[in-house]
């Protein structure tokens, strides 16, 4: 579905998002500067939105997150939202494959005053994830999966190993303008997402839902999965 064929209710999404950002006072200079630096470096405009950032903060505070893992940093816009929601003394680790993006992200975190609490590690997430097992700050209370989409099922398995009962796993971009409900999709990103979602029903390790989101970046959604007690 292209932007031109979005149903007539579509344009209201962006207007409402703008209203909510204003009404709720979402965003500030550090967040705006991070987005501006990300754009100035020519990076794609695929950060979460401010409304989604606040949503992630509310979730992080709900689970009283002291340790957060993010997979996919880009310019650290989402990292700033999550880093600010850390409990006192908390730590965040974010994984980014692109060294240039990682250094932009570090600069943005430093400028936001989060350089000490939030660490960006460079490398392919599947290579880095095993090194996080069994040492602080793991187990993570919240894991935000937002990197390459075909690997989502593998990231989810890693998140289960790196969390604990009560940890929250959040996966971004799982609706993709509705593409997720096409079983015949040949898009490897959609296939990756469906591989995860189609197995959640029978996965006794988690209790999960998917929330669709609309806003200035269109129609998408998050998987929310709470790791269950094994008993
Ligand atoms: N979370 C960010 C957006 C991340 S965009 C925000 O909302 O602000 C996805 C990022 O994942 C990109 O910067 C991309 O370089 C990175 N990425 C892609 N494949 C990866 C991999 N295999 N390992 C780690 N990072 C990866
Ligand atoms: C894409 C990736 C994202 O993480 C996102 O939030 C939006 C789009 C992408 O690769 O197209
Ligand atoms: Mg995303």
Image (spheres, grey):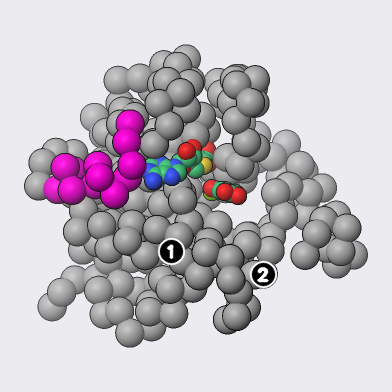
Q: Could you say where residue 16 lies in the image, as x and y percent from the top left? A: 78, 50
Label count reads 2
Magenta stretch? 122-133
Residue at the bottom extreme? 202
Q: Is residue 63 magenta?
A: no
Mark nearer the viewer, 1 or 2: 2
Q: Is residue 130 magenta?
A: yes
**Residue at the image point whose x is 24% and y is 29% from the top:** 89
Where residue 226 sits, quadrant-wise, is: bottom left
Q: What x and y, as percent, mark residue 143?
A: 34, 51
Relative to the observer, which residue lies in front, 116 or 119? 119
Which residue has dot 1 on it? 224
Q: CA distance from mark 1 to mark 2?
A: 17 Å
Which residue is drawn at the image coordinates 41% and 52% (left, top)? 145
Which badge, 1 or 2, is on the more N-terminal residue? 2
Is residue 227 shown above or below 115?
below
Using the image, determine if residue 108 lies above or below residue 159: above
* Kind of element beneath mark 1: strand
In the orientation shown, which residue stands out farthest toward the front?
Answer: 186
> Residue placed at 43% from the left, 32% from the top?
98
Indicate the secondary structure of the residue bearing disc 2.
helix
Q: Residue at x 16, y 42 (%)?
A: 131
Question: Are there few (<14), some (14-19), or many (20+) residues within 10 Å of tag 1?
Answer: some
Q: Quadrant of the N terminus?
A: bottom right
> Eyeballing the image, is 184 above or below 74?
below
Q: What residue is pinned by disc 2?
A: 178
Looking at the image, can residue 136 be seen? yes
């Amino acid at each position: 579905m292209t932007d031109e064929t979005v149903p007539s209710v579509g344009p209201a999404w962006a207007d409402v998002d703008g209203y909510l950002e204003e009404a709720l006072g979402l965003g500030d200079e550090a967040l705006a500067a991070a987005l501006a630096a990300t754009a100035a470096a020519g990076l794609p405009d695929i950060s979460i939105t401010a409304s989604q950032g606040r949503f992630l903060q509310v979730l992080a505070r709900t689970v009283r997150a002291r340790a957060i893992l993010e997979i996919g940093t880009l310019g650290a816009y989402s990292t700033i939202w999550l880093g600010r929601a850390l409990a006192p003394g908390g730590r965040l680790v974010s994984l980014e494959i692109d060294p240039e993006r990682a250094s932009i992200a570090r600069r943005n975190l430093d400028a936001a005053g989060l350089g000490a609490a939030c660490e960006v590690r460079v490398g392919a997430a599947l290579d880095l994830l095993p090194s996080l097992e069994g040492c602080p700050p793991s187990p993570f209370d919240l894991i935000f999966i937002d990197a390459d989409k075909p690997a989502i099922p593998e990231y989810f398995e890693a998140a289960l190993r790196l969390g604990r009962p009560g940890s929250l796993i959040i996966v971004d971009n799982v609706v993709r303008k509705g593409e997720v409900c096409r079983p015949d999709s040949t898009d490897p990103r959609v296939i990756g997402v469906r591989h995860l979602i189609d197995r959640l029903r029978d996965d006794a390790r988690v209790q999960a839902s998917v929330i669709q989101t609309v806003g200035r970046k269109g129609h998408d959604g998050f998987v929310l999965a709470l790791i269950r007690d094994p008993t």
